[in-house]
């Protein structure tokens, strides 16, 4: 499997961050020029009020923005003032991090569990345990436990990312010290900043995606913008110098980068309701306020003389495309898929297992939960950023 990340301006005011896996457009984000994302920012938040009936607090951050904080999430917070009593109260000051962007009518969500991420590690403050990527082999996990086991004594928790596979002890220890230093700054100095101020700005989302890309898959990073190239190069020299050779400035003015990769065509197709499959079958993808519904249809499919064999082929092809579309359109929350009905229970179970296998490749946490009595497959995917359609509206493309 080969991955290639493309960064180019679709228009002077819209940056496209696209990821191609085996030459197939798999992820796409649209970023308005000059508009910074709040996701990952850390603030000295002030508790405005507490709504016990929904077990949440509303916290004010920079610019008077009100954010949603689930009360169950307030575990071992970093206080920015002398705290009286154990319960969260109006007027309290504490460090909060934006965990989900504002979506439609919903306010941004914040958490007191601060996350500081690097290429190999993530430092967490609310869960002070050691966690290891599920993609590690048993041997690799044991090797990493030997290298990182002593970190359990730190005043923080750690998640060992997939990229840590085959990383040497010096690389891991260097990043460990750097993230601990950042956390020390937040809890000893940042807490004395003004109420509601931003004390830690997250990286631009395209740098975050580069940092989080799986090292063994990402083969190349391409941009045709000299300013972007300089920024990415500086970032990689500081954060991931071992991958610097993957960065390339595309300079062919006769064939623009977006044309070479048919990026505008890919965006147009990703915003359509109907998705055609190679077999002639098609998907209908309909996001609603509460969930997303995906319907699988036989369409023009004519292959296979046996009905059950035909249905199995369509459903397998649909499952592969659905896994791609979730990433491409950044669909999240609850997703219900109406596959073509299969008579045999073992066929339905096989399809469920196939969907689970495909979703394990998603960088975002995603799962196939079960099949309902009506034959609908229930999927979930973690919500962090706006959907591609919402991004397109924000950028004036829709």
Image: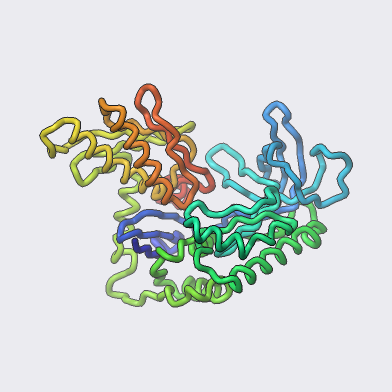
User: Where residue 265 sits in the image (x, y, percent)?
Assistant: 29, 55
User: Residue 85 vs residue 337: left or right?
Assistant: right
* Residue at (61% x, 44% y) in the render: 108
Q: Residue furthest left?
A: 305
User: Residue 155 vs residue 221: left or right?
Assistant: right
Could you say which is closer to the camera, residue 97 or residue 33? 97
Q: Quadrant of residue 284?
A: top left
* Residue at (46% x, 43% y) in the render: 366
Q: Is residue 211 visible?
A: yes
Total numbered labels placed on residues in the image:
0
* Residue at (10% x, 34% y) in the render: 305
Q: Is residue 157 above or below residue 372?
A: below
User: Where residue 8 sits in the image (x, y, percent)?
Assistant: 41, 65
Could you say which is closer to the camera, residue 136 or residue 18? 136
Query: In which quadrant will I find the N terminus?
Result: bottom left
User: Where residue 299 sits in the image (x, y, percent)?
Assistant: 19, 35
Q: Is residue 221 above or below residue 195?
A: below
User: Where residue 104 sits in the image (x, y, percent)?
Assistant: 53, 39
């Amino acid at each position: 499997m080969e991955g290639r990340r493309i960064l180019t301006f679709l228009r002077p005011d819209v940056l496209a961050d696209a990821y191609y896996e085996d030459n197939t457009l798999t992820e796409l984000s649209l970023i308005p020029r000059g508009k910074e994302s709040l996701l990952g920012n850390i603030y000295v938040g002030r508790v405005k009020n507490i709504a016990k009936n929904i077990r949440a607090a509303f916290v004010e951050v920079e610019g008077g923005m009100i954010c949603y904080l689930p009360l169950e999430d307030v575990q071992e917070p970093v206080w920015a003032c002398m705290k009286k009593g154990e319960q969260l109260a109006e007027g309290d000051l504490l460090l909060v991090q934006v965990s989900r962007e504002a979506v439609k009518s919903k306010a941004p969500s914040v958490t007191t569990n601060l996350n500081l991420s690097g290429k190999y590690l993530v430092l967490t403050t609310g869960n002070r345990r050691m966690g290891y990527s599920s993609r590690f082999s048993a041997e690799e996990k044991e090797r990493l436990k030997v290298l990182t086991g002593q970190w359990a004594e730190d005043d923080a928790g750690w998640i060992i990312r997939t990229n840590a596979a085959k990383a040497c002890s010096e690389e891991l220890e260097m990043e460990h010290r750097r993230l601990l230093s950042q956390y020390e700054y937040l809890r000893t100095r940042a807490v004395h900043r003004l109420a509601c101020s931003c004390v830690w700005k997250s990286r631009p989302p395209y740098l975050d995606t580069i940092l989080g890309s799986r090292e063994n898959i990402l083969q190349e990073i391409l941009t045709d913008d000299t300013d972007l190239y300089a920024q990415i190069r500086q970032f990689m020299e500081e954060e991931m110098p071992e991958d610097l050779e993957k960065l390339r400035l595309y300079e062919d003015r006769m064939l623009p980068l977006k044309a070479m990769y048919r990026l505008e065509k890919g965006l147009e197709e990703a915003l359509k309701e109907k998705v055609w499959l190679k077999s002639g079958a098609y998907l209908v993808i309909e996001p609603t306020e509460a969930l997303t519904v995906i319907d699988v249809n036989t369409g023009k499919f004519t292959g296979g003389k046996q009905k059950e064999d035909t249905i199995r082929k369509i459903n397998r092809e649909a499952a592969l495309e659905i896994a791609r579309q979730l990433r491409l359109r950044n669909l999240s929350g609850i997703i219900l898929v109406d596959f073509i009905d299969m008579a045999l229970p073992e066929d339905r179970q096989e399809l469920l297992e196939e969907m689970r296998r495909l979703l394990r490749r998603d960088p975002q946490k995603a799962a196939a939960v079960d099949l309902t009595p009506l034959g609908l497959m229930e999927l979930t995917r973690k919500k962090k950023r706006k959907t591609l359609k919402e991004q397109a509206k924000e950028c004036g493309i829709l």
